[in-house]
Amino acid sequence: MAKPISASKMLELLRAEGLTVHEVRNWRTHNRNTKGPWGPLNGVMIHHTVTSGTAASVDICYDGYSGLPGPLCHGVIDKKGEIHLVGNGRANHAGLGDGDVLRAVVNETGLPHDNEADTDGNRHFYGFECINLGNGKDPWPEAQKEAIEKVSAAICRHHGWSERSVIGHKEWQPGKSDPRGFTMDGMRRRIADRLGGKAPKPDPDSKPTPAKPSYVPFPGADFFHVGQKSPIITAMGRRLVAEGCGHYEEGPSPEWSDADRKSYQAWQRRLEFRGKDADGIPGKVSWDKLKVPAS
Ligand SMILES: [Zn+2]
């Protein structure tokens, strides 16, 4: 028993599961809530559309047809495994089904055979329509099956449900055959694996690894001579100023100057180089310690 997932939360959960999600028209407020109750929620129901073509199938699921107004589900799962959200709230997908099945879903026990149509399923189930002709020949691409697995797992994980809260329409309502082309037991095993941590859930607290700062490698002592002009020299000068070793009246500038040499000498002395080792011409050890940022 659970409170319905809000539109924004649904979007967030599905995207966090790695799914590509499309928002169709006014799906956030598109529902049948004026016709009957919505919730408490107890499970996820999988269907096939008996249609082909993504755009046409999504339109039918949003609008419905004469005699059965839309939305006909909450999301459409296309052959590429992308999700099209068409409704949020009560939707015309489950119809009347077997109350014994609902009890089994609530308790997450084995499913009894569905032989009664005495219970309003639209109140209790999220519904996903998968684009397939349902003739037993139309293939189910792996991407589409993986999307069924991900959608189901995302919702189950949010509510704290197991894979047993996911059923096919054919397990709910007598006379229904959907989904046809894979077994719901096989799909539930996949969902269980995903929930069991074999497909790690994205960690909301994870931060991107900071990029390593990069420094200018030592260009060699010969690089530093009168007439040399380079942005490296400006960057070096800025670091010397930052270290309190700057002897610049103006600048630093890109052109190697006496001020650079004096400033660098101060840095070498800071590092306890003496005599010829503190002549103001950069050497590798002092250069590496200065950490001149590469632009
Ligand atoms: Zn169905």
Image: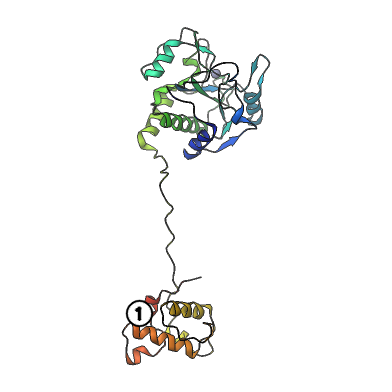
Residue 61: horizontal and vertical position, in percent? 62, 24
Q: Could you say which quadrant of the image residue 138 lies in?
A: top right
Q: Amino acid at mark 1?
A: Val
Residue 240: horizontal and vertical position, in percent? 43, 80
Name the residue that disc number 1 marks: 285
Residue 49: horizontal and vertical position, in percent? 59, 22
Residue 15: horizontal and vertical position, in percent? 51, 39
Taking the view exactly as shown, the residue that stands out farthest to the bottom is 275
Q: Residue at x 52, y 10 (%)?
A: 175
Q: Is residue 99 above or below residue 19?
A: above
Quadrant for ligand 1 reads: top right
Q: Residue at x 40, y 46 (%)?
A: 205
| Figure quadrant of the N terminus | top left
Q: Residue at x 50, y 81 (%)?
A: 233
Which color scheme does this rendered protein use? rainbow
Q: Is residue 19 above or below residue 287?
A: above
Left or right: 148 in relation to 92: left
